[in-house]
Amino acid sequence: MWGLAAAFYLYGFFQRVAPAALAQDLMRDFGLTAAALGNLSAFYFYAYAVMQLPTGVLVDRYGPARVLFIGAFMAGIGSLLFALSPTPALAAIGRGLIGGSHAVAWVSMLQLVTHWFPARKFGTMSGLSLAVGTIGAVLAGPPLRWLADNYGWRSVIAVSGVMAVALTLAIRGFVRDDPRDRGYKGHVPLRTKGGANGRPSIWRGLLDIWKLRNTTLLFLVNSGICGSFLTFTALWGVPFFTQLHALSVQQASLITSAMLVLFAIGGPVIGTWSDRLRRRKAPFLAGALMLTVAFAVLALVPSASLIVLVPLLLAGAFGAGAMALSFGFAKESAPARLQGTVTGAVNMGVMTGTLIQMPLIGVILDHHWSGELENGIRQYGEPAYQAALLLLAGWIAVSMLLLIFTRETHAGTRAEPELP
């Protein structure tokens, strides 16, 4: 159950990060500026963010199995459209379809974890789920670059679309919402659902989640902690290293992929620590501090030696994995009927930060562009990257401060929270 959901999450993470390795190809084939590339890449996040709240409600209403099935199918269609697009507009629509459909993966997977695993394992499984997804981002680094060089980026993305359609069939055949659907004892007590037709009210759920203090704070925290991390690793990190530090695309992709690997490791490690400590806030703050320090140095001294920058960024990436705690943190702050919806709201914070930051950094880079071109691709200097990175570093720092004001849930060991 979890494995097939995790496979779809891995697939979507691959598509999320792919533009970083394909940046030069996309800029060349579609004639894009930095701002236009940022906007094209961000179409994934636009649709993903828009779908987060509806996704949480749909999972609460119809169950994760059905939602995953539809999402995987639409992601395959979006990938095929992106691969075959002759214009940037159609490519953007394809990216939007991928992002909107993949929006269901994380919330559905966590709902399956809630039902198929004991509650004491939620922090660990959240981190492990994030780690599996991040493998997709690693595959979108040097492996994708190698495949694109040998077979063309369009062919690779098209084949990935066919694979998503095949995954759809597996999800349809095997995934079930609850152990009781397979004749096993359940971990979660059955509850009576309210609203029309015995199901929870959609609008009531959407309104009620924002009455919970931690929902709003964690939404904002994730926009900086994870949003900024993804903005760098999923798009702008590779151009930064190739243009400012004269690395090859393969070498730059290796660094951003290593960051994603440490991010993946940080999730389950910090999640396990949190479960054992029965605290969410302190481990989350520790990870956020690591990321804040790393990006502060990166922004203030972007041309510093890679011997200094790379270890700092890897440590910061490990700390960023603490964002996996935000989902358990949010679910433990909400009544059972709203847990899918509140998870979607917190995940929407990640995408909201990224969809704003990706194109905005492109605008900042273009504003500081000195006119230099290489093979028809704009080249940006240290002042441009410093201005762009200061935006990310500041956003992360503010997010860490907001995290201080969240209320500890003690890993769900207290009575179920009630709405104010």
Image (tube, rainbow, N blue to C red):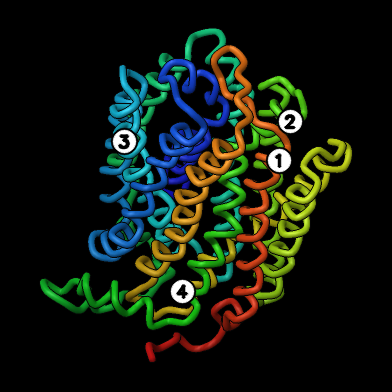
| Point 77% across, 29% down: residue | 245
Q: Residues within 10 Å of mark 3 (few under 14, many from 20)?
A: many
Question: Which residue carries the number 1 mark?
Answer: 383
Element at badge 3?
helix
Q: Looking at the image, is 65 positioned above or below residue 53?
A: above
| Point 32% across, 47% down: residue | 68
Q: Looking at the image, is 377 positioned above or below residue 335?
A: above
Report the mark closest to the observer, 4 or 2. 2
- Mark 4 and mark 1 residues within 8 Å of each other at the beta carbon: no
| Point 65% across, 68% down: residue | 400
Alpha carbon of mark 4 to alpha carbon of mark 2: how far? Answer: 37 Å
Q: Position of residue 418 (x, y in %)?
A: 40, 89
Alpha carbon of mark 4 to alpha carbon of mark 1: how far? Answer: 34 Å
Mark number for residue 6?
none
N-term mark: 3 or 2: 3
Alpha carbon of mark 3 to alpha carbon of mark 2: how far? Answer: 42 Å
Alpha carbon of mark 3 to alpha carbon of mark 4: how far? Answer: 33 Å
The residue lying toward the viewer, choosing from 259 and 398, is 398
Q: Position of residue 18 (x, y in %)?
A: 51, 30
Q: Residues within 10 Å of mark 4 (few under 14, many from 20)?
A: some
Report the mark closest to the observer, 2 or 1. 1
The answer to whether one can see residue 183 in this image is no
